[in-house]
Amino acid sequence: MTCDSDPALFNDKINRRTLIAAAAIAPALIATGVSGANAQAATGTAKVALVTGSSRGIGAAVAKRLAREGFSVTVNCVVNRDLAAAVVAEIETAGGKAVWEQADVSDPAAVRRLFDVTERAFGGVDVVVSNAGIMRLAPFATMSDEDFDRMIAVNVKGSFNVLREAARHVRDGGRIIALSSSITQLRSPTYGPYAASKAAQEMYANVMAKELQGRMISVNAVAPGLVNTTLFTDGKTTEQIEGFAQRTPHKRLAEPSDIADVISTLCSSDGGWVNGQTVFANGGIV
Ligand SMILES: NC(=O)c1ccc[n+]([C@@H]2O[C@H](COP(=O)([O-])OP(=O)(O)OC[C@H]3O[C@@H](n4cnc5c(N)ncnc54)[C@H](OP(=O)(O)O)[C@@H]3O)[C@@H](O)[C@H]2O)c1
């Protein structure tokens, strides 16, 4: 489903769906004595997650995983609308609830619209995963202004745009997660500006966790290592990718679902006491 639908029909359909979802989820959560973000559902409001950059890769795995955990999910893309719609269709086929919205996170107005769409669709937001990101690699000597500026616009400004709205909109007891990278520790040649843009996420999470004190909202950065997505594999030969895999203790790249497992745990009632941290999810490569 997309917000391109007739707004009146859309709202009506969503309101009914949200009520049905809340009715379905609340008894189960009350029975298991959940707390934190999940407590929202226990009091009658379905849990809601917004995942930026979730048309593919890690974001898509996170969106599907959170939907399996009972969240209504907003899926986001910047160009691949078909992929975003496919993620929503997969969630709905599995019995979950989702909408998708195109929004370039580097545009503050588009990000405000993304939160608007989520609140109109599901009545609020409990979890925000600031995942949308791009990677441009080059040594300092040859990095172009265009690549540097776009990476900063999406990774640093874009994630700021998302986190600012998250601070304004996430309900008490919620979770906010920003995607860093283990490259902040590995610090390999050609990764300078990208690593700097990811280090920003770790600072954002730590400072924001303190700013949101008293609201039981936990804010963390998650720093994956080498993950099998096009962001990592594009431009590399099969031999190069295998070489990277062999450098990890587990002798393989992470799959997006490995990272979704970690993020899902942080978003669960079990994850609430991890706050203001960077969680390195890299299979031990650092
Ligand atoms: N893969 C890794 O090895 C790895 C390791 C550490 C950290 N990370 C981080 O994890 C996050 C996800 O990476 P990934 O590997 O899953 O990347 P990916 O497969 O390239 O997917 C990127 C996602 O972000 C979306 N996106 C890109 N620019 C956007 C923008 N301006 N506004 C909104 N959405 C945008 C893309 O949408 P479209 O489909 O519309 O283009 C897509 O959904 C990134 O922040 C990355 O830095 C990745």
Image (cartoon, helix red, strand yellow):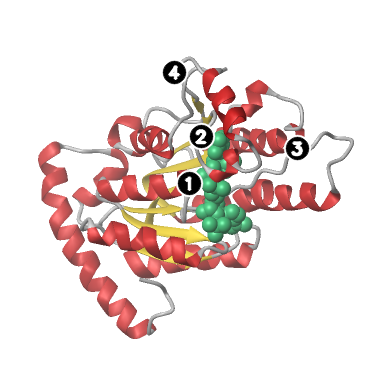
Disc 3 secondary structure class: helix
Q: What residue sits right under mark 2 in the picture?
A: 227
Q: Estimate the x, y position of residue 109 in percent, counting from the top left.
A: 61, 67
Image quarter for residue 232?
top right
Q: Estimate the x, y position of residue 53 in percent, counting from the top left.
A: 51, 53
Instruction: Indicate if the residue with disc 2 has its beta carbon within 8 Å of ligand 1.
Output: yes
Q: Is residue 124 visible?
A: no
The mark lying in front, picked from 3 and 4, is 4
In the picture, which quadrant includes the C terminus?
Answer: top right
Q: What residue sits right under mark 1 in the picture?
A: 57
First in sequence: mark 2 vs mark 1: 1
Q: CA–CA distance between discs 3 and 2?
A: 19 Å
Q: 10 Å neighbourhood of mark 2: few (<14), some, or many (≥20)?
A: many
Q: Can residue 275 be seen in this view?
A: yes
Residue kind at label 4, given as amino acid type: His
Q: CA–CA distance between discs 3 and 4?
A: 28 Å
Q: Estimate the x, y position of residue 214 in percent, counting from the top left.
A: 43, 39
Residue kind at label 2, given as amino acid type: Val
